[in-house]
Image (cartoon, helix red, strand yellow):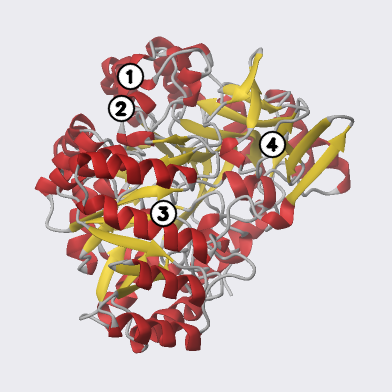
Amino acid sequence: MELICPAGTPAAFKEAVDAGADAVYCGFRDETNARNFPGLNFSREELGQSIVYAKARNVQTFVALNTFMRAGCESLWHKAADDAVRLGASALILADFGLMAYVAETYPQQRLHVSVQASASNREAIRFLVDAFGARRVVLPRILTVQDIARLTRQIDCEVEVFAFGGLCVMAEGRCSLSSYATGKSPNMNGVCSPASHVKYRQEGAEMTSELGDYTINRYGPGEAAGYPTLCKGRFSVGEESGYAFEDPVSLDVMDHLDALRDAGVSALKIEGRQRGKAYVAEVVATLKKSLTADASGRAALISRLRLMSEGQRTTSGAFEKRWR
Amino acid sequence: MSTPRKPSLSLGPIYYLWDGAKWRDFYFRIADEAPVAHVVLGETVCSKRQNFTEPHIADVVDRLEAAGKRVTLSSLAMVTLERESQHVRSLVFDSSHPIEANDLAALGLLRGTPHSIGPLVNVYNAATARVLAARGAENICLPPELPMRSICTLAAEMPDFSFEIFAFGRMPLAISARCAHARSKGLTKDNCQFICREEPDGLPLRTLDSQSFLVLNGVQTMSHSCVALVEELTEIASAGISRIRLSPQDCDMVAVVQIYDAVLSGRLDSGEALTRLAAIYPSTPFSNGFYHQEKGAAWVARARNATLGA
């Protein structure tokens, strides 16, 4: 299985390449990609230099253009696709049908990957994307079990990539407007979720309250570490109970399923975390790379080291196991 | 310039789980009393629920068609299981009615067959709408997240195409493989005992400071606020939008349809319409923030209706 690694900066890109990534994915510094955070992402020049660096080491570069084109402003996304192709991207990761059609028509030779944001979760959906746009690979939404994936890969003529480590969406990706309901900014339209610009922390006596927009997302008692108020990982009240109504503040870790995923026909494992620093990226990539070829005991040691990288956070294998539902 | 045609009214699918008899009687009353041209129906949120309505679908469709309504069948929003794939296939291949696609599976299977696109498919621009139209889509209900500027741009770029706007009801905001509704009652999706039946208008989720925020509806998360695009109807009609969608809530939907019909016909002032809507669907604030390019929960209104928001 290929290892697909995140890069939010040219420095992280280089670290990922040096650490053994098979491919690095990144985006331009604007709303054309779903990690449109301040201080992150690549200028045209930076992407060009990074691609040259990667190519010299036989590493691929995937460019994520995975937001949905704003009506009337399609040229911003078209230009991003033109430039990514011109600079030599190995693949474009796309979510918007209109943009897929543009790339398929304008650059029929260009490898087209379907972003997780497109929410292609079954064989008919993937066949549609292959037939209509010549999609070569689909990144599966994090709503399928390993068994579902094994069944799916046998039914389609398209490579499959799955998320293996890092942040976890609780909702089906690309189909969630919770963030824009609370803040006006959404992953689909603006490339952000629960944006920092709308986050506030409020100290009241010994308690710390975190807010997103006008909404309380969590409250922490004395000594409890306050986390970032990602909307779907907040504490809410339902009926008489209060708690993590959607999901605890956990991250995704499917290291225990590596062999099962390979047997299921998965072509590539994806690490989430373009917002992460270069040290994190280097460590996660190197450790995962070794895990893929290690024997059982060696892998166990590597995985426990990797779990330290989750920064004390608990991890879950999420929808990959049926009981998560 | 010619006067824009008056948009027609459409009733969206019931997103909640209602008991079979309640579901059937709701549509019988719509058939008999509601001035709505189009009715989209069928389970959209969770494939486990289909047994509740299936015994009544034929009767409901007959009654609606006898009353002159155009009936469209809604496809599932999320398809992951083999059983769900089969269901979409049989809906597409065995049904004599047009289908509204809410997921990419239905989209793929419907190629070359006239069909509709539901608000759960991501159509944010005319380039995407053209791709879908070329494959047989004849009507697209745009996602509730779209601002007015995008709606007008789409309509202007495809003036002969039928676009539909989600103008009343709690908004579908997210869907998950995990059932937060069942989990809130100590159950899981696979062993849910159809517990979402207990809340025919969704299970309120509040913040720790008791702010109204969202409602749980099985695997779907919806807004607590109810979209009410009423003062905006004139602008929507002028933009060339063909249909106005009203999404069923557990309230007097016949009265809701009548109010929208009266506003579109110029018989009722929008301010008075909002006052009446608030009486029909009390204790749920209105919102229209997405349309006005603000947070979705926001309520942008003329002074006299300012108190109807959150």
Say if mark 1 contacts mark 2, CB within 8 Å.
yes
Work out which quarter of the rendered image holds the N terminus of chain A and state it.
Answer: bottom left
Amino acid type for the residue under numbered disc 2: Lys
CA gap between label 1 and label 4 equals 33 Å
The residue that disc 4 covers is A225
Q: Quadrant of residue B274?
A: top right
Q: Which residue does the numbered mark 1 point to in the structure image? A: B190
Amino acid type shown at disc 4? Ala
Q: Which residue is mark 2?
A: A322
Q: Secondary structure at mark 3?
A: strand
Please tell me which residue is depicted at 76% across the width and 27% down the height of the picture.
A221
Kind of element beneath mark 2? helix
Mark 1 and mark 2: span between their CA atoms?
9 Å
Residue B107 visible to an observer of this rendering: no
Left or right: A147 with respect to B175? left
Question: Mark 1 is on which residue type?
Answer: Asp
Disc 1 and disc 4 on one polypeptide chain: no
Please state which of the two labelled residues, at mark 3 or mark 2, is closer to the viewer. Answer: 2
Q: Position of residue A45 (x, y in %)?
A: 49, 89
The residue tagged 3 is: B140
Position of residue A60 measured from the top left corner of the image (x, y, whole percent): 29, 74
